[in-house]
Image: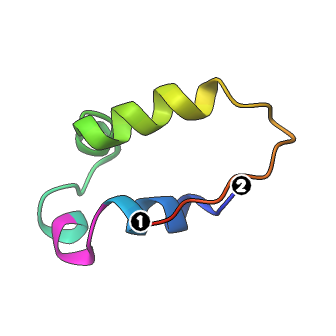
Amino acid sequence: MKSKYGVLHALFDNKLLVLELKTLDKLKNEPQMQKFLVWVRKQDPGKRISVHR
């Protein structure tokens, strides 16, 4: 799996992360992140996953 930082930067730009998504709660409540978390929970833990912009 791509690093958690790679996933964050694939979904959000730095400006949005710094200005609006400063906390874990704000990040988890972001619709794009919720969709990703639902999807990733269904994946095999040993599976290698690539995230593309």
Callout 1: 10 Å neighbours few (<14), some, many (20+)?
few
Residue shown at the point (38%, 32%) measured from the top left: 35
Residue at the farthest left position? 19
Compared across the picture, whether 3 is left or right of 53 comes to: right
Residue 28, quarter of picture? top left
Image coords of residue 43 (percent x, y): 70, 31
Q: Which residues are magenta?
A: 12-16
Looking at the rendered structure, the secondary structure element under dot 2 is loop
Compared across the picture, whether 44 is left or right of 43 comes to: right
Q: Is residue 39 above or below residue 50?
A: above
Residue at the farthest front position? 52
Residue shown at the point (79%, 31%) measured from the top left: 44
Nearer the observer, 39 or 21: 39
Residue at the farthest bottom position? 14
The residue labelled by disc 1 is 10
Which one is earlier in the sequence, the residue at label 2 or at label 1?
2
Residue shown at the point (63%, 63%) measured from the top left: 3
Residue 8, quarter of picture? bottom left
Looking at the figure, which quarter contains the C terminus? bottom left
Queried whether the magenta region covers residue 15, the answer comes back as: yes
Q: Main secondary structure of the magenta part?
A: helix
Q: In the rendered structure, which amino acid carries the disc numbered 1?
A: Ala
Image coords of residue 7 (percent x, y): 49, 59
Residue 42, quarter of picture? top right
Q: In the rendered structure, which amino acid carries the disc numbered 2?
A: Met
The residue labelled by disc 2 is 1
Q: Is residue 11 above or below residue 25?
A: below
Image coords of residue 22 (percent x, y): 24, 57
